[in-house]
Amino acid sequence: MYPAFFESYDPIPWSRKKDPNQLMGSPISAFKKVNPVTANLDNPYPLAYVEYFKLGLEQYVPQRFDLSLAYFDSALSVSPSPYNRYLLYECAFALGKIGSYDSAQPILNQIIADDSQFVFAHRDMYLYERINGDSAKAAIHERWIKKMTPWYWDEIKQIVDLQMRQNQKRK
């Protein structure tokens, strides 16, 4: 929740599989220092912001993404500017989970414009560009993912390919 921390560290994702036969492991993040910490670690966010953000994340397990969005919107309503890009990402992620790709994409594109190393935004945009049939744009996100987290690529590719097959069956 500390802006100075997020300006100095980027998340590095990977996943851990309990069973090597399962398609998707549990997502895990570590943080890599990319800039020196130059500001005080003062938390500018009110307690209500933290509570709404936490409640929104808690709705992921029961897959109540519409409720997640409501909590994230509440967090944004009490948030100081500029908005925390991790909260914005969670909004975009939840929008994608309910199928509102057109609403999620501008948020993800802005996150990438602000921080080109935000791997999760590239991962989701890779999926959306595949859904949109734009292989050139998907390839850009693929290159970023492979550059930043080459160990994560095979799993991302498998998951996106599975989602693409599921989307084809629905049509």
Image: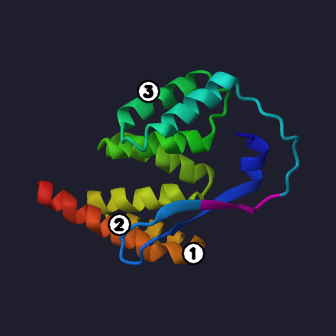
Residue 6's label in the rendered image is none
Q: Position of residue 51 (x, y in %)?
A: 60, 28
Residue at 83%, 35% in the rendered image: 42
**Camera sees residue 157:** yes
Front-lying residue, 142 or 97: 97
Seen in the picture, residue 165 relative to 67 is either above or below; the reply is: below
Seen in the picture, residue 20 relative to 72 is either above or below; the reply is: below
- Separation of marks 3 and 2 at Cα, in angstroms: 27 Å
Question: Which amino acid, mark 1?
Answer: Lys
Task: Considering the whole magenta stretch, tell me its main secondary structure.
Answer: strand
Q: Residue furthest front?
A: 18
Question: Which amino acid, mark 2?
Answer: Ile
Q: Magenta segment range?
A: 29-35
Q: Quadrant of residue 166?
A: bottom left
Which residue bears the numbered disc 1? 147
Disc 2 packing (10 Å; few <14; some 14–19; many ≥20): some
Mark 3 in CB contact with mark 2 (< 8 angstroms): no
Residue at 50%, 31% in the rendered image: 72
Q: Position of residue 104 (x, y in %)?
A: 40, 43
Residue 70's label in the rendered image is 3
Secondary structure, mark 3, is helix
Residue at 57%, 33% in the rendered image: 53
- Separation of marks 3 and 1 at Cα, in angstroms: 35 Å
Seen in the picture, residue 141 relative to 57 is either above or below; the reply is: below
Question: Which amino acid, mark 3?
Answer: Ala
Which residue bears the numbered disc 2? 159
In the rendered image, the quadrant that contains the C terminus is bottom left
